[in-house]
Image: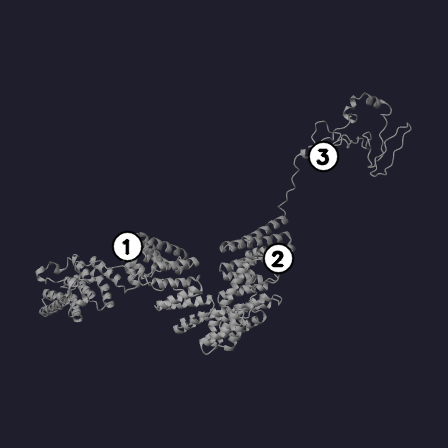
Amino acid sequence: MENVHLAMEEEDLYSGYNDYNPTFDSEELENDMDFQQAVRTSHGRRPPMTAKFPGTAIGARTLGTSFGARVPLASSMGRPMTGAVQLQDGAARPMTAVRAAGYTSSMVRGSTFDPLGQSKGPAPPLEAKNEDTPEEKIKILEKKVNDLIEESCMAQSIGAFQLALEKAKEAGRKERVLGRQRQQSGNTDHINIDLTYSVMLNLANQYVNNEMNPEALNSYQVIVKNKMFSNAGRLKVNMANIYVKQKNYPKAIKFYRMALDQISNSHKEMRIKILQNIGVVFVRTGQYQEAITSFEHIMSESPNIKTGFNLILCYYAVGDKERMKKAFQKLITVPLGIDDEDKYIPTNDDTSSNMVIEAIKNDKLHQMERDLKVLAEKFIMTAAKLIAPAIESSFAIGFDWCVDMVKNSQYVELANDLEINKAITYLRQRDFNQAVETLKTFEKKDSRVKSAAATNLSFLYFLEKDYDQADRYADLAMNADRYNPAALINKGNTVFVKNDHEKAAEFYKEALRNDSSCTEALYNLGLTYKKLNRLEEALDCFDKLHAILRNSSQVMFQLATLYELLGDTQRAIEWLMQVVSVTPTDPQALAKLGELHDREGDKSQALQYYQESFRCFPCDIAVIEWLGAYFIETQFCEKAIQYFERATLIQPTRVKWQLVVASCYRRSGNYQKALETYKDIHRKFPENVECLRFLVRLCTDMGLKEVQEYADKLKKVEKMKENREQRVRSGREGSARGRREGSAGSADSAHSSSSTKGERLSAKMRSLPGSNEPYEASSPKEIDASYVDPLGPQMERPKTGAKRRVEDDDFADEELGDDLLPE
């Protein structure tokens, strides 16, 4: 016991096992004289004992010899007590009671303790599989086919349909190679039918995704005709869907019915969906009675909201009023299978329950329930608006019947929305009085409905320019629901038209705080900042709006206008180019591009855009004037004539355009045509002084007899003009008289040439050189001193500021948000 050590007392768990009495040290026996002497005696030369050692406590005892020597008895465990006992093979048994485990007699001092034989090195590697065997080749090829099918499906899930088709084709090729290998190896009994089915079905589906319908039909047909594939008949539904895409409706109905026959009644949901498809195809072919049969069967077996709506449409198509009413009543009683919204309202008692409710409040299941409820409400609203005029003698009575039915159903909150839709329907029918009366009935309803009705009333009165009533109902809508952005926008609009732009901006900002995605409020705020000349803030508003409405031409035009006001012409041109890319036939945007290019000195680009604007809208006087002046300036008077003649047709009472046409004829050398034009002008405007002066001049140079007649008329007209001007001067005093005196010597008061754009046009045209013009060499004394050429040197470039898409001064209702009605 003195050599026994507890494990907890030593750091080394194996220490102490080799500590024993030196008397038992067999390695020192060679030096033990007493032991060597005993070995040499006859007792040491005795043969070894061959007794077996029993393994139980009742083992036999060995008997003593004739010499009286005794051999020790077996221990209770069946093993000898000393190391003098030898085994049958002659080897002495080790004394394991005092030696470490794993000791053998062959070990020498200093040998390593290695009971597991790890010093011999790593175990030999496992025998490699032989891949040259047919079984291994088949297994490897099967794995490759499965991997290709999986890769094809993954490519389809990310929208890479072409890659998915290529993988599916490759899987089909390898599957055929696999079949040939099985036949060659004679292992046809173990053909993987499921793998073949998967390969062929995936290939057919990828053909459908790539719109390769004939190939898809062939693939499906191969699967359907193969008797080895169980339940392949339901793939006829896929084939029927392809025929629907191809608008081959008779064949689609045939395959739907074949699929329906091969599906057992236990698959009720599948059969219902196929019947729905059959009914929809019958609707497309105009066979409403057959469609009604399918839909009625579905509503009796498993009613759903879509089928109920389709049934109402079919009854409406055949004009059956009573069955329309019954179908509508059936529609509003269809169970949606949606839990009550109250379960998502947290309670104050249980914290753990509140955490669970918070987690599931916006999960996928709740979103699906909300979408289903919104879809059901949409179908009910649409059905009510559809059948209301048909089921009763008038639209109002029919709508009231629908409202009564809805009030007694699970959709009771839709009744008020139906009433509002009734008012909107009146608006579409141009019955504004009935719409207003309907909306006014909501003034005593709950706050949400009252706010929606007041918002619509405010918008209606605003469109009618009754701004006081619009302001009143905007206030009513705000008081009912302060967080209604449409009500705040209407209030801002009514304040804006009173020129209180700062206050209007506050209302628009409040609407944006309540709904950051309200584009009407952001647009109006940008226009308000533009009115206040806070151009950078307006630019920021329209930049944000452009990020929301990427393809809005109005927003892009406003950005171009703001950059123009900021002096950045190049950025303005870039934004206008985007406007033209969205609306290539917008004449105002094209004209504005022409104006900006003209301002930059690029006449060729300006001409291109002005001509394109004229092509899209040939009635814009500013565009016509610029084009005519451009061709006169470049000495192509013949081309300018067609534009000024267009202006004459648009404004036939403006003598300026007719005078310019006559001057173009004169400058182009066509004097006879110019004389006829002047005579025609004189017949229409007998008191026009400029026309008479040209007639006198032309008749004089051409030697015509009418010269004296026109000269007398010119004197009379000038005399009348002087008398008229004297009366005007005598009736005016101060600065007004001075302004009128400055305009003496011009045309009559109706067409005053000194203040019109036509005089400036004539002034500039007279300054242009004309080598073929015989009148340029004439002496000034030959012409009356008060003569003014309608193409004279004071012509200015026409005002090409084409009317903007959204006028800042008008501030029309489309600027202020033309969709203020509640959704």
Sort mark 3 into few (<14), some (14-19) or many (20+) by Cα contacts within 10 Å: few
The residue carrying pointer 2 sits among few (fewer than 14), some (14 to 19) or many (20 or more) residues within 10 Å by Cα, namely: few
Find disc 2 in the rendering and name its residue: 193
Front tag of 3 and 2: 3
Disc 3 + disc 2, Cβ < 8 Å: no
Q: What's the colour scheme?
A: one colour
**Callout 2 amino acid:** Ile
> Tag 2's secondary structure?
helix
What is the C-alpha distance between the residues marked 3 and 2?
65 Å
Tell which circle, 3 or 2, labels the residue nearer the N-terminal end. 3
Q: Is residue 518 left or right of residue 195?
A: left
Q: Which residue is mark 1?
A: 597
Up the image or down, 26 lies above or below 532; here it is above
The Cα–Cα distance between marks 2 and 1, rounded to whole angstroms, is 73 Å
Rendered image quadrant of residue 586:
bottom left
Nearest-to-viewer mark from 1 and 3: 3
Residue 714, given in percent of the width and then of the height, sits at: 11, 68
Location of residue 759 with respect to 332 vertically, above or below: above
**Front disc: 2 or 1:** 1
Q: Earlier in the sequence, mark 2 or mark 1?
A: 2
Residue under label 3, please give it.
Answer: 7
Towards the viewer: 214 or 565: 565
